Amino acid sequence: MRKFYYYLTTCILLFTSCKEEQKTVETSEERAKPNIVIIYADDLGYGELGAYGATELKTPNLDKLANGGMRFTNGYASSATCTPSRYALLTGVYPWRNKSAKILPGTAPLIIATAQTTIPKMLKKQGYHTGIVGKWHLGLGTGNVNWNERISPGPNEVGFDYSHILAATQDRVPTVYIEDGHVVNLDPNDPIEVNYQENFEGEPTGLENPELLKMKWHHGHNNSIVNGIPRIGFMKGGEAAKWVDEDMADYFLADAQDYVKKHKDEPFFLYYALQQPHVPRTPHTRFVGSSGMGPRGDVIVEADWMVGEFIKTLEAEGLLENTLIVFSSDNGPVVNDGYYDDSEEKLGNHKPAGALRGGKYSLFEAGTRVPFFTYWKGKISPGVSDAMVSQLDLFSSLAALVESSESTEDSMELLDLFLGKSNDGRAEMIIEATSRTAFRKGDWAMIPPYEGPAMNKQVNIELANSDEYLLYNLKEDIGQKINLAKSNPEKLQEMITAYEAIRGKENTEIQQLELK
Ligand code: NG6
Ligand code: CA
């Protein structure tokens, strides 16, 4: 019997010391893994930040990061609209490979396959806790979502341990927050119904009830009214769950800060997807009038403040030296995107696209070339790079950072570039805008001919539709004013050949932006 106790005690001791040892090894390994935060703005243009040449708008917090990190002057979103860019960012796959990667209604099913690899999935395998706070817009469920039950599949099914999101856009229903698949504050006695085809009987709309509106619609946006703002799509019920637009910035900031505090003792990945400056622009009263440019400028000031507060939290928690921050925007700028919000009247001398041509929805540069920088205190030396880089490249580059062997065909491993240790970027890249594609290689941009209006008059943006090939030398002509297709046929041919090698010859399916 005594012998038995002796063995038992030895076993327990051995087991405990083994576990202890394992724990120490694990902890130091984990510490070697930096936290990763992607802060992603919605519709923020190339010329919108002080660090990118803005003079009329003050963005001190973002400027501090951009100037204190690696700032890219040739940094691109994959698409000139939201859903495709977000798809590419998270999966490392060109959005035009997925036919569903188009601007989605709030009822669209999830467009990332649950078997597909994503940045959060890859990081999870390397021991990361992963979270998303903010805008999703990649679809939810498999069709016919019941908003009153757990909504799945969604972010939690494609790699996020934690999700606290708005389903689509601030201007689309359902106008509720969803946390880990559950509508926040949902009253079971007041169930939510959503429909993008027809209204629910007796429910007011922006079209029929202008007297109920505090913000008027300019085009589209005349369906259900929530918080005095007409939206895209119809919604009924869920009164207690509806968000207050003016509180959204504070709401998501508090959650992002909370996430950091909760997970500071393990490596974490946070995708913090801001809703600004997408429409409807609804600054908190603290920011109303802060820019002198109306709500559009005010929400940029608000977003800048949010980022500053978020960084303060990382600093207070002692995490700033161990966190890689990536900042960018999902597509270029639009001034009037469907509401009368003084954005055009009060724009003054501010140039949302800087010197670039076009804007959101456009194949010209302003559609996809966006603010893009990395910041890592003590690790990345301040610098500016003109190397070409796409948000697509984050997948393989972050994989390299955490020593994962995963990569995708479309995503280039450019870790040294992101860390400021090299200036080698992409040689070439396809960009997308409302299902049309164009090509960038070296200093050159080539846009194939597309049918459709040259200009979207509602949003006042040149879309780059033309009945002939467009070819620009961006080094000499960043504003894309001189079409060199006719005068430089060899270059044009070289560009077409290189473009078709990636894109294929058959890409004539053209989906023009729906004009309502
Ligand atoms: C468009 C909306 C626009 C915006 C956009 C999506 C109309 C007329 N326009 O269809 O306001 O919501 O979709 O923007 O409805 S994105 O940044 O999410 O791609
Ligand atoms: Ca967007």
Image (cartoon, rainbow, N blue to C red):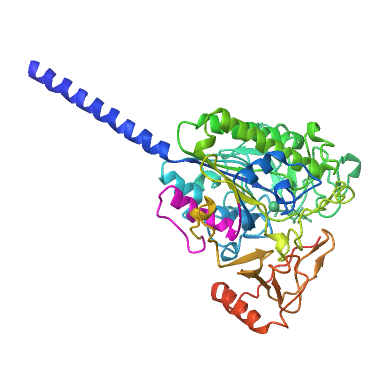
Placement of the N terminus among the 4 image quadrants = top left
The residue at 91%/41% (across/down) is 211
Looking at the picture, tell me which residue is in the foreground, 417 or 507. 417
Residue 58 % position (x, y)? 77, 41
Residue 414 % position (x, y)? 50, 57
Q: Compared with residue 21, is residue 198 higher up or lower down, i.e. above or below?
A: below
Q: Compared with residue 512, is residue 49 higher up or lower down, i.e. above or below?
A: above
- The furthest residue to the top: 2
Looking at the picture, tell me which residue is in the foreground, 190 or 494. 494
> Does 399 lie within the magenta span?
yes
Residue 516 % position (x, y)? 81, 60
> Does 121 lie within the magenta span?
no
The residue at 57%/54% (across/down) is 89
Residue 88 visible? The answer is no
Looking at the picture, tell me which residue is in the foreground, 460 or 179. 460
Residue 70 % position (x, y)? 59, 49
Residue 194 visible? The answer is yes
Using the rendered view, name the quadrant where residue 368 is placed.
bottom right
Seen in the image, is 25 located left or right of residue 120?
A: left
- Residue interval drawn in magenta: 384-411
Seen in the image, is 459 located left or right of residue 210?
A: left
